[in-house]
Image: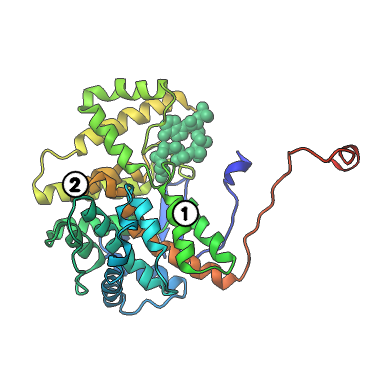
Amino acid sequence: MANAAGLEGVVAAETALSDVDGERGRLILAGHDVESLAPRASFEEATALLWQSAGLPADELRAGLGLARVQAATLLPGLTRALSLADGMDALRASLAQLETSEPLAVLGAVPVFAAAWARARRGLPAIAPDPARGQADDFLRLLRGEPADAARVRALDTYLVTVADHGMNASTFAARVVTSTGSDVVSATVAAIGALKGPLHGGAPGPVLDMLDGIGSPPEAEAWLRGELAAGRRIMGMGHRVYRVRDPRAAVLEAATQRLEAAIGTSAGRLPLARAVERAATALLGERHKDRSLAANVEFYTAVLLDAVGLDRTLFSPTFAIGRTAGWLAHMAEQRATGRLIRPASRYVGAWPAGLAQNLAP
Ligand code: COA
């Protein structure tokens, strides 16, 4: 184990939900390769696969989620303060904390409703009523803009939500499992997971990736800009991964989805060419600095480019990640609950010993 503080390589659970093969760059979601599932399945279909694997009810998921969104919207008048918070993840955490339910569906349906209400409140706009007949991706875009999005953008967002729906024992999933293992409830575990996802080493990176692309401006500037960041001791956002030693397979899925979307909506001025140039330059520079450790693009790199092409503001990138990942969190909670086992690891004491005991008891 490279570093005990990061628990790398420690198996903390058995799961039927997803497998991350960091050496080969392969991600399996409920028995399907991410490359085959994400471009085709709707968010509801992928969630149903995960939830069936975890023993959660998954019939009529699309209709159930629609009703859950309508139900969540009835809570909005009481969430004014929570939704006035400046950061979208803070607003999600505060508003989800107000839910009183043990129903996974109620939690999953609430996330896009609260995220969209927050985004509209920031612009001084009132929330819009959910349409229970639509899919989660479709309705989220409608709840943000006030009008339905085109099919290409909905498909791109579905691909994104499926791509990020689950990913092994990542930090937020582990947080959700730890809370669940104490016998606590789904709302508490979701709130803990949101807190973990917010950090820039986990789900907080895609907004800064877009800031980076803006800062670089054009491909010829990439290398000098990146060198400056590294010289200043800063990390390149969207690069590197705790588990993958090759390019994150989700980066390829999202890169291809961005290309399809840009072709469908006829954007020649999209950010994809710049993103590819920056990825090439960053991979080369990080390769020079870390010859024994491959640092390649991770999911967040092309999340930024795809969600930007879908038309989402960068402040919504992490909340949108949460919409997808909540499906996985809830499935992991069900798996964890079924084990009935408290997660309670150990620590090694390196502090001071009481006077007089030191010589006899200190190891
Ligand atoms: N930019 C520059 N250097 C990086 C880097 C990056 N994105 N990612 C890792 N490194 C460097 C580290 O500084 C470290 O260097 P050192 O050995 O000289 O100290 C070395 O590579 C090993 O990194 P380590 O901290 O052991 O990796 P980790 O497994 O803890 O980190 C991440 C994984 C994802 C946290 C890390 O790659 C990172 O911070 N990436 C940027 C944030 C990001 O994209 N997050 C989204 C993840 S999906």
Q: Indicate the quadrant where residue 99 lies.
A: bottom left
Please name which of the two marks, 1 or 2, marks the residue nearer to the observer. 1
Q: Are marks 1 and 2 in contact (CB under 8 Å)?
A: no
Amino acid carrying label 2: it is: Ala
Quadrant location of the N terminus in the rendered image: top right
Along the horizontal axis of the image, is 316 left or right of 9? left
> Label 1: which residue?
172
> Label 2: which residue?
309
Confirm whether residue 34 shows in the render.
Answer: no
Q: From mark 1 to mark 2, how far is it between C-alphas?
A: 26 Å
Q: Residue at x 35, y 29 (%)?
A: 282
Amino acid carrying label 1: it is: Ser
105 lies above or below 33: below
Picture coordinates of residue 336, whole percent (x, y): 54, 67
Picture coordinates of residue 325, whole percent (x, y): 38, 58
Picture coordinates of residue 258, whole percent (x, y): 21, 47
102 lies above or below 28: below
- Asked which secondary structure carries label 2, the reply is helix
Picture coordinates of residue 312, whole percent (x, y): 21, 49
Q: Residue pushed farthest left?
A: 266
Residue in front for this viewpoint, 46 or 215 = 215
Quadrant location of the C terminus in the rendered image: top right
